[in-house]
Each structure stands twice: as structure tokens, then as C-alpha cells.
Image (tube, rainbow, N blue to C red):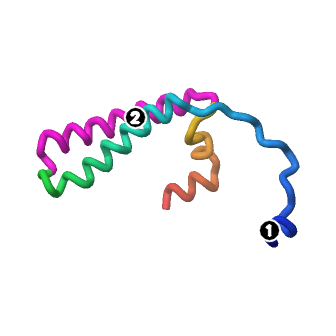
Amino acid sequence: MLGILLLPQDKKPLKHERFDFAGAALLAPALVALIYFLNMGLKEGWASPAVVVSYVVFTIGMVTFLVVERQSDSPMVDLKYRQEVCVSNAWQR
């Protein structure tokens, strides 16, 4: 409640951005494959066909997601922030 009184209001209105359906469609299966890979690797063995396939699906999905996000007008994850100095230095530590 005190935040409403003490914090300044935003001066510029937020721009309306569209939802990134392509990014969501690529990220969701990649994350499901990653969760399956991590959960089932110990139970079934890391070299079992299902676990290896889930790792391949995750890798292809994430690479495709990153390529699509770099070209998107309204990305789910704005990769341009990675180029800023303070963010870049944080990634190196």
C-alpha cells in the first residue's frame, strides 16, 4: 500500500505488444523435453532411447527458439539485452 503512495508513476505508456505464438510453440515442447530428460535420465538410464530423443528434441527446440526470437518483432525473451555491457558482464561471471 505504501508503494502506491511513495513510488513514482511511469511517465510513458507501455506499448502494446502482440503475444509471440511462434516462440511459445517452440519453447513449450523444448521445456517439456528438458524436464523429461532430467527426470527420467536416472530412472531409465542416460543412454536409453527415450532419454536421448528427449535431449535431441530439447536441443533442436531451443536452437530453433533462439533463431525465431532474434527475428521476432515482439519476442518472449528479448535477446538484445544480452549485448548491453552490464548484462554481458553478469553473464561472464
Per the rendered image, the range of residues in magenta is 46-73
Q: Secondary structure at mark 2?
A: helix
Is 27 positioned to the left or the right of 51 in the image? right
Q: Residues within 10 Å of mark 2 (few under 14, many from 20)?
A: some
Residues at discs 2 and 1 in contact (Cβ within 8 Å): no
> Relative to 73, is 50 above or below?
below
* Quarter assignment of residue 71: top right
Q: Which mark is residue 63?
A: 2
* Majority secondary structure of magenta residues: helix
- Determine crowd level at label 1: few under 14, some 14-19, many 20+ residues with C-alpha closer than 10 A: few
Q: At x 81% / y 72%, what residue is drawn?
A: 2
Depth check, front residue: 77 or 90: 77
Residue 78 lies, in percent from the top left, at: 59, 41
Amino acid found under the numbered disc labelled 2: Val
Q: Secondary structure at mark 1?
A: helix
Residue underneath mark 1: 3
Nearest to N terminus: mark 2 or mark 1? 1
Give me the residue at 78% from left, 42% from top: 14
